[in-house]
Image: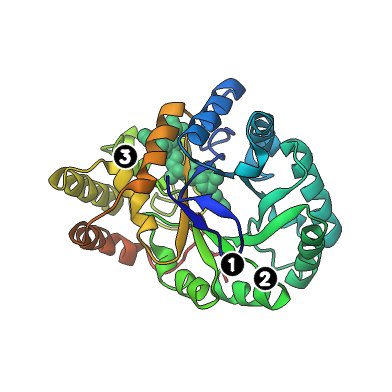
């Protein structure tokens, strides 16, 4: 496993982290029972993963609780616990209460990385940052960060206080952050943490055709607005998406590389990406994903992957929000 320093801090995170959204159930995922989820966290940790990503929103706290139950059996100082406060809870008192509730569910005295999950235009960022900075001074949070944040909101946030990372959707089928968001982060010295690096399973090689993909997960703007769970107003890019997956699969065959490893290693080869957060609900998947941190992609393969995915990037356009036409990124 390789590790990288997160932003301008002394926090070292594994380049592959474990995402703990998909254990929580909901429309996208099948809920993972606690025993299996704990085994998955242990398997990831044994493979060198120290960066665990959860949120108060995941399964209404279930994800934080499960992570909390494993922390007792791990060396707490060797684990980087990351959680997120929801956009509805960014007012001063609400944020303080959210953080305390997360600490309680996580059974810990401090959260290593605490993200603003999405910005809330109704609540001044200065108020949110005041609460976050107090929590940091009290030792309840080590590192402040944002997620799903565009350049203008990032600038406003940085005027109110320092954040070290922006957690954003980034994978071979979702390169929209390359238009503006990534550059804004680099200019401000803010690290990128990539979420959904396997495009919610599309990049695992397990789905040859759209009919095979779980309908509950057909929510991103890749899929038509007519899909049951879609919350956007677009026709989607279903044909182009599956053609692009086919091209990536062909390249993996040509270069004799494993598709999951290529998909996870690709964001790690992009500027300023500190870590990828791969969701997994089995020890086997967690172990396979951890191995991707050590995978090196050749310049030729990177160029071919760029070629194979550029059309889809252009068709999806500059909106970095995978789920909404009316982008929440400003
Ligand atoms: N900040 C945000 O707004 C935000 C939004 C989305 C996600 N995230 C974070 O990013 C994490 C990851 O994103 P994600 O869960 O959306 O998607 P993802 O990591 O791109 O994909 C997860 C899917 O890939 C499958 N998978 C994982 N490893 C595999 C392997 N080695 N072989 C075959 N299949 C494999 C998983 O199946 P199994 O379950 O069977 O292992 C699951 O269906 C989340 O858990 C969360 O922590 C953050």
Name the secondary structure under disc 3: helix
**Quadrant assignment, res 175:** bottom left
Q: Nearer the viewer, mark 2 or mark 1?
A: 1
Mark 1, secondary structure of its residue: loop
Please, is residue 65 above or below residue 10 in the view? above
Compare marks 2 and 3 and give the one earlier in the sequence.
Answer: 2
Tags 2 and 1 touching, CB below 8 Å: yes
Disc 2 element:
loop
* Residue found 48% across the figure and 37% down from its top: 216
On screen, 277 above or below 145? above
Residue 150 shown left or right of residue 254 in the figure: right
| Residue denoted by label 1 | 8
Q: Which residue is mark 3?
A: 210
The disc, 1 or 3, on the residue closer to the chain's N-terminal end is: 1
Quadrant occupied by the N terminus: top left
Residue sitting at the far left: 254
Judge left or right: residue 138 versus residue 235.
right
Tell me residue 310's x, y (percent).
27, 64
């Amino acid at each position: 496993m390789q590790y990288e320093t997160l932003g301008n801090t002394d926090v070292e995170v594994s380049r592959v982290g474990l995402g703990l959204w998909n254990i929580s159930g909901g429309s996208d995922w099948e809920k993972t029972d606690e025993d299996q989820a704990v085994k998955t966290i242990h398997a990831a940790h044994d493979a060198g993963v120290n960066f665990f990503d959860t949120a108060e929103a995941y399964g209404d706290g279930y994800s934080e609780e499960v992570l909390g139950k494993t922390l007792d059996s791990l060396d707490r100082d060797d684990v980087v616990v990351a959680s997120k406060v929801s956009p509805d809870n960014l007012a001063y008192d609400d944020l303080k209460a959210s953080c305390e509730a997360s600490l309680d569910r996580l059974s810990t005295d401090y959260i290593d990385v605490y993200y603003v999950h999405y910005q809330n235009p109704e609540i001044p960022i200065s108020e949110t940052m005041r609460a976050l900075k107090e929590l940091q001074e009290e030792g309840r949070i080590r590192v402040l960060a944002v997620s799903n944040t565009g350049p203008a909101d990032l600038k406003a946030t940085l005027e109110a206080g320092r954040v070290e990372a922006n957690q954003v959707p980034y994978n071979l089928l979702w390169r929209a952050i390359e238009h503006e968001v990534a550059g804004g982060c680099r200019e401000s010295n803010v690290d990128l943490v990539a979420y959904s690096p396997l495009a919610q399973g599309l990049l695992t090689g397990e789905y040859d055709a759209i009919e095979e993909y779980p309908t509950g997960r057909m929510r991103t703007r890749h899929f038509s607005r007519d899909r049951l769970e879609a919350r956007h107003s677009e026709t989607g890019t279903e044909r182009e998406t599956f053609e692009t997956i086919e091209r990536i699969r062909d390249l993996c065959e040509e270069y004799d590389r494993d598709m999951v490893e290529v998909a996870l290693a690709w964001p790690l080869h992009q500027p300023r990406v500190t870590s990828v957060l791969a969701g997994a609900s089995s020890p086997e998947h967690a172990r396979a994903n951890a191995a991707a941190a050590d995978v090196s992609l050749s310049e030729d393969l990177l160029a071919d992957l760029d070629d194979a995915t550029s059309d889809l990037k252009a068709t999806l356009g500059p909106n970095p929000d995978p789920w909404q036409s009316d982008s929440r990124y400003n």
